[in-house]
Amino acid sequence: MEKIRVVLFDDNYDLRESLLAVFKNHASIEVIGCYAHAKEAPEIVLSSQPDVVLMDINMPGLNGIDAVKKLKKTAPNIPILMQTVFEDEQNIFNAITAGASGYILKSSPTSKLVQAIEEVHYGGAPFSPGIARKVLGFFQTQSPSKEEYHLQPREMEVIEYLVKGLSYKQIAAKMDITYTTVRFHMKNIYAKLHVASMTEVVAKALQNKWFR
């Protein structure tokens, strides 16, 4: 089985070493880079081309959210999973709008972190349960947009599954369509919503309260 290549940014030495030990002999994950700060994150990611970036928020010099913004400009197709001790709505919102593909707490079991890396690699948007509730709560306090996006029923169905955290592969199975068809729907959804990432689709759906 081909391993998911991960680059890790975290200023906590003990955590870095712990994750390196966990992933060293893991069947599906390989850490190809491990860094204490994200100042050179765009250059590192461009040169190493990982499958997933695992990013801390609270780091010296350049925080994780600002690093995500830079990475989405230089490597927009590489998914970024935020890992942090923070669980407040503003940090979650900032990470999502910056372009992060998922958000998981450092207190989560290692098995959940592995699952989140796998999910984000295959097109999902993983969030820890408590974080998912906070994301929904945050967007429910926002004023819904009245703009008409002219989304088709099947496109809305795809978006609903994305909001639930399903990957493209899982959505294809649920809807009894091919992976390629899911990607086709997503291309149309991006165009209609004027967004460039899956997390922006989820954010817009929650903000507009399309699903209860």
Image: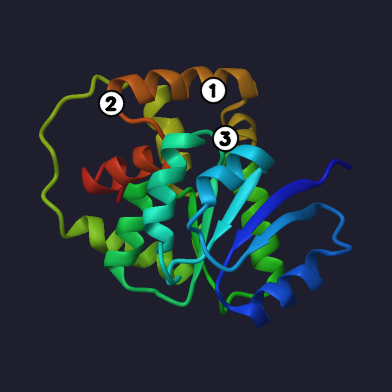
Gap in angstroms between the C-alphas marked 1 and 2: 16 Å
Between residues 196 and 39, which one lies in front from this camera angle? 39
Mark 3 or 1, nearer chain start: 3
Gap in angstroms between the C-alphas marked 3 and 2: 22 Å
Measuring from the top left, give residue 3's x and y in whole percent: 81, 46
Q: Which residue lies under the disc numbered 2?
A: 194
Q: Residue at x 64, y 21 (%)?
A: 178
Q: How is the image coloured?
A: rainbow
With respect to residue 191, does 162 lie above or below?
below
CB within 8 Å, label 3 to label 1: no
With respect to residue 10, does 162 lie above or below?
above
Looking at the rendered structure, the kind of residue marked 1 is Arg
Q: Which residue lies under the disc numbered 1?
A: 183
Q: Residue at x 30, y 58 (%)?
A: 93
Q: Is residue 152 visible?
A: no
Between residues 95 and 152, which one lies in front from this camera angle? 95
Please identify the quarter of the rendering in which residue 95 is found: bottom left
Q: Residue at x 32, y 46 (%)?
A: 203
Q: Secondary structure at mark 1?
A: helix
Q: Which residue lies under the disc numbered 3?
A: 171
Query: How many labels were placed on the picture?
Result: 3
Please identify the quarter of the rendering in which residue 110 is found: bottom right
